[in-house]
Image: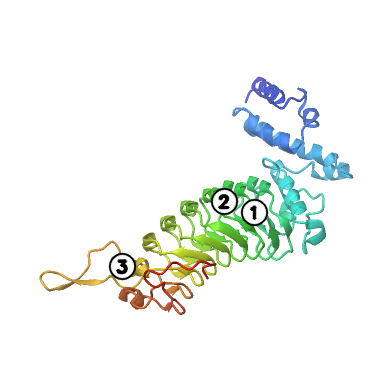
Amino acid sequence: MEQAQLSGAWEDVCAFLRVPFGPLLHTLSYVNGIDLARFETACPPLARTRMCESASKAAVLASVRRLKGGLDLALRLEGQSWKQLTGWIGSPPAWCVLHELFSATDGPGSWEWKEGWAATDVDVSRWFGVSARAGRVVGLNLFGNRLKGFLPETVGSLTNLRELVLHHNELGGAIPATLGKLRRLETLDLSCNRLEGGIPDALGGCASLEYLNLAQNRLSGFLPPALGRMGSLEALHVDHNGFAGRLPRELGDCARLEVVNASHCRLSGRLPAELGRLARLKALFLGHNAFEGGLEALAPLCGPPPRVTLDRGAAALADAPHAEAGALKEVYVNDNRMDVGDPPPRLVAGLNVLFVVRNEPPRPGAREAKGDGT
């Protein structure tokens, strides 16, 4: 890379940020964390790699020097590479996001374990519950740590996050729609909190999500069709909430689903036929709702394929899309309004558990009872 090209690119960046053009360290004395994020975006492709690496390190050191007692800390960091300065990389830097999370969830006054969170250590991988790889935050595991307050929207800027585990805390408020920006997220567990509102449609943007647990909160509204966009989803837990309406037929698009738990809600209607496409489904928990109708939608998911009698009178296997025994082994539809008196033989033959007690189908012609649907 030619020096003239670097110099021109640097001048363009300074003009973009509206800061004085000059030596790198001098210019960065005018730049805060948010401006650094804009700087990373503004770098021309020709200069991006070299300039972002040097600027990231320079910005870290300049920021550290401004801290109380930061001069000595900056001297100790001089010999580290920019990748070693974990938590100061990103747009905005991860340490900014994590400090906002710490503040929004009453970290100083409530958290039980908070090693590193209240210090000036720039390596966030050494903070309690934080996992980092190559300078990027990839995991937050703070379950059962007495987090209170709410999840800030900036958590959605941790775009390298693979795991967000915050169950068994006291988090309230809504699920931030910005979590839908976490395209690499594989595990999201917010169960056993006090979250309110609905599941944001934007959460369907989590294309890599394999495990979603929102159980035992105060969530309400309808289960969004956007759940069907989670093509990698293997386990869905939304039980013990106030969700109403029908199961979205789009769940049938989640071809990798193995477990669905939507029990103890206020769901109603018939089971969508699209559930019959979930060839990997092993367990279905729908008890304590207001579902109606039969279990025919589940028949393709278990047992051997049905035998039919052809015109010639010979018995043969049906030429159907579900030619192999299904994976479904456990179905819990107790405490609903379903007609389970004569379940499909294939369903009975293929299941290990079929729990159907306390179902009372509505009488023909009777008005649907009003109430909470339990």
* SS class, disc 1: loop
Residue 86 in sight: no
Residue 300 spot, x, y in % from top left: 33, 67
Residue tagged by mark 1? 174
Identify residue for label 3.
324
Disc 1 residue type? Ala
Is residue 67 visible in this depiction of the protein? yes
Q: Toward the viewer: 297 or 360?
A: 360
Location of residue 81 with respect to 187 vertically, above or below: above
Q: Position of residue 226 (x, y in %)?
A: 49, 51
Please tell me which residue lies in front, 8 or 233: 233
Q: Secondary structure at mark 2?
A: loop
Residue type marked 2: Pro
Query: How far across and down, in percent of the image, does residue 233 sit?
Result: 49, 58
In the foreground, 339 or 65 = 339
Would residue 321 appear left or right of 14 to someone viewing this image?
A: left
Q: Is residue 33 left or right of residue 237?
A: right
Cα gap from disc 2 to disc 1, whole angstroms: 9 Å
- Which residue is denoted by mark 2 in the rendering? 200
Position of residue 284 measured from the top left corner of the image (x, y, whole percent): 46, 69
In the image, which is nearer the foreground, mark 1 or mark 3?
1
Q: CA distance from mark 3 to mark 2?
A: 37 Å
Whether pointer 2 and pointer 1 mark residues with C-beta atoms closer than 8 Å, the reply is: yes
How far is disc 1 from disc 3 in space, using C-alphas? 43 Å
SS at circle 3? loop
Instruction: Identify the residue at the far left of this view.
Output: 312
Closer to the chain start, of discs 2 and 1, is: 1
Q: Amino acid at mark 3?
A: Glu
